[in-house]
Image (cartoon, grey):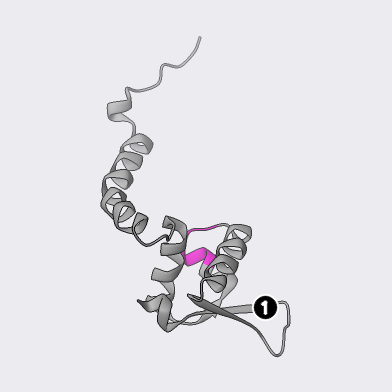
Amino acid sequence: MTKQLPSTSRSLPIALIRAREGVMSPIRDMLSETGITEQQWRVLRVLVEFGRMDAKTLADRSSLLFPSLTRIAATLRDKGLVTQTRDDKDRRRQFIEITANGQK
Protein backbone atom coordinates (compact mmCIF):
# COMPACT_ATOMS: atom_id res chain seq x y z
CA MET A 1 0.00 0.00 0.00
CA THR A 2 1.40 3.42 -0.96
CA LYS A 3 0.78 6.53 1.05
CA GLN A 4 -1.00 9.24 -0.88
CA LEU A 5 0.77 12.60 -0.87
CA PRO A 6 -1.14 15.70 0.15
CA SER A 7 -2.30 18.08 -2.54
CA THR A 8 0.38 20.54 -3.65
CA SER A 9 -1.91 23.33 -2.44
CA ARG A 10 -1.44 21.96 1.10
CA SER A 11 2.26 21.13 0.83
CA LEU A 12 4.46 23.30 3.07
CA PRO A 13 7.66 22.82 1.00
CA ILE A 14 5.87 23.85 -2.19
CA ALA A 15 4.20 26.80 -0.44
CA LEU A 16 7.60 27.98 0.81
CA ILE A 17 9.10 27.69 -2.68
CA ARG A 18 6.21 29.70 -4.14
CA ALA A 19 6.64 32.38 -1.46
CA ARG A 20 10.39 32.58 -2.12
CA GLU A 21 9.80 32.94 -5.85
CA GLY A 22 7.25 35.69 -5.24
CA VAL A 23 9.69 37.64 -3.09
CA MET A 24 12.72 37.10 -5.32
CA SER A 25 11.07 37.91 -8.66
CA PRO A 26 11.45 41.72 -8.42
CA ILE A 27 14.95 41.33 -6.98
CA ARG A 28 15.95 39.12 -9.92
CA ASP A 29 14.65 41.78 -12.32
CA MET A 30 16.80 44.40 -10.59
CA LEU A 31 19.84 42.11 -10.53
CA SER A 32 19.59 41.26 -14.23
CA GLU A 33 20.34 44.92 -14.99
CA THR A 34 23.53 44.85 -12.88
CA GLY A 35 25.12 41.60 -14.03
CA ILE A 36 25.07 40.21 -10.47
CA THR A 37 23.61 36.78 -9.78
CA GLU A 38 21.23 36.08 -6.93
CA GLN A 39 23.96 34.19 -5.05
CA GLN A 40 26.47 37.01 -5.57
CA TRP A 41 23.89 39.48 -4.27
CA ARG A 42 23.38 37.37 -1.14
CA VAL A 43 27.12 37.43 -0.45
CA LEU A 44 27.32 41.20 -0.97
CA ARG A 45 24.20 41.75 1.15
CA VAL A 46 25.65 39.78 4.07
CA LEU A 47 28.95 41.65 3.82
CA VAL A 48 27.14 45.00 3.86
CA GLU A 49 25.33 44.00 7.03
CA PHE A 50 28.13 42.26 8.95
CA GLY A 51 31.36 43.54 7.41
CA ARG A 52 34.57 41.57 6.93
CA MET A 53 34.30 37.91 7.87
CA ASP A 54 35.87 34.54 7.31
CA ALA A 55 34.70 32.50 4.35
CA LYS A 56 33.03 29.74 6.38
CA THR A 57 30.88 32.20 8.33
CA LEU A 58 30.04 34.06 5.14
CA ALA A 59 28.95 30.84 3.43
CA ASP A 60 26.70 30.00 6.39
CA ARG A 61 25.14 33.47 6.59
CA SER A 62 24.64 33.58 2.80
CA SER A 63 23.01 30.12 2.77
CA LEU A 64 25.63 28.79 0.38
CA LEU A 65 27.76 25.69 0.34
CA PHE A 66 31.42 26.49 1.03
CA PRO A 67 32.66 25.31 -2.41
CA SER A 68 30.06 27.56 -4.08
CA LEU A 69 31.15 30.52 -1.99
CA THR A 70 34.76 29.94 -3.02
CA ARG A 71 33.80 30.24 -6.69
CA ILE A 72 31.44 33.18 -6.12
CA ALA A 73 34.02 35.08 -4.05
CA ALA A 74 36.62 34.65 -6.81
CA THR A 75 34.18 36.08 -9.37
CA LEU A 76 33.31 39.01 -7.09
CA ARG A 77 37.01 39.62 -6.47
CA ASP A 78 37.68 39.66 -10.23
CA LYS A 79 34.87 42.22 -10.62
CA GLY A 80 36.45 44.36 -7.90
CA LEU A 81 33.47 44.00 -5.56
CA VAL A 82 35.25 42.18 -2.71
CA THR A 83 38.77 41.63 -1.44
CA GLN A 84 40.15 38.38 -0.06
CA THR A 85 42.98 38.19 2.46
CA ARG A 86 44.56 35.30 4.33
CA ASP A 87 44.74 35.13 8.10
CA ASP A 88 48.29 35.85 9.30
CA LYS A 89 48.14 33.06 11.89
CA ASP A 90 46.26 30.41 9.90
CA ARG A 91 47.02 30.70 6.19
CA ARG A 92 44.15 28.30 5.37
CA ARG A 93 41.62 30.82 6.65
CA GLN A 94 40.43 33.56 4.30
CA PHE A 95 38.66 36.80 5.10
CA ILE A 96 36.35 38.45 2.61
CA GLU A 97 35.44 42.13 2.68
CA ILE A 98 33.24 44.24 0.44
CA THR A 99 34.85 47.09 -1.51
CA ALA A 100 33.45 50.55 -2.20
CA ASN A 101 32.36 49.32 -5.66
CA GLY A 102 30.64 46.36 -4.04
CA GLN A 103 28.76 48.75 -1.74
CA LYS A 104 27.36 50.57 -4.80
Is 99 contained in the magenta span?
no
Q: Which residues are magenta?
A: 59-64
Q: Is 16 located above or below residue 48 in the figure?
A: above
Q: Is residue 26 left or right of residue 46?
A: left
Residue at 42% in and 60% down:
35
Q: Is residue 93 left or right of residue 50?
A: right
Residue 60: where, in percent of width, then height?
51, 64
- Quadrant of the rendered structure where residue 88 is? bottom right
Q: Quadrant of the C terminus?
A: bottom left
Looking at the picture, tell me which residue is in the foreground, 78 or 96. Answer: 78
Amino acid of disc 1: Arg
Residue 33: where, in percent of width, then height?
33, 58
Residue at 48% in and 59% down:
63
Q: Would you call the spot at circle 1 few (<14 residues within 10 Å), some (14-19), or many (20 or more)?
A: few
Q: Is 91 located above or below residue 56 in the figure?
A: below
Q: Which residue lies most toward the bottom here?
A: 88
Residue denoted by label 1: 93
- Quadrant of the rendered structure where residue 46 is? bottom left
Q: Which residue lies most toward the top here?
A: 1
Looking at the picture, tell me which residue is in the foreground, 59 or 39. Answer: 39
Residue 31: where, in percent of width, then height?
35, 58
Residue 94: where, in percent of width, then height?
64, 78
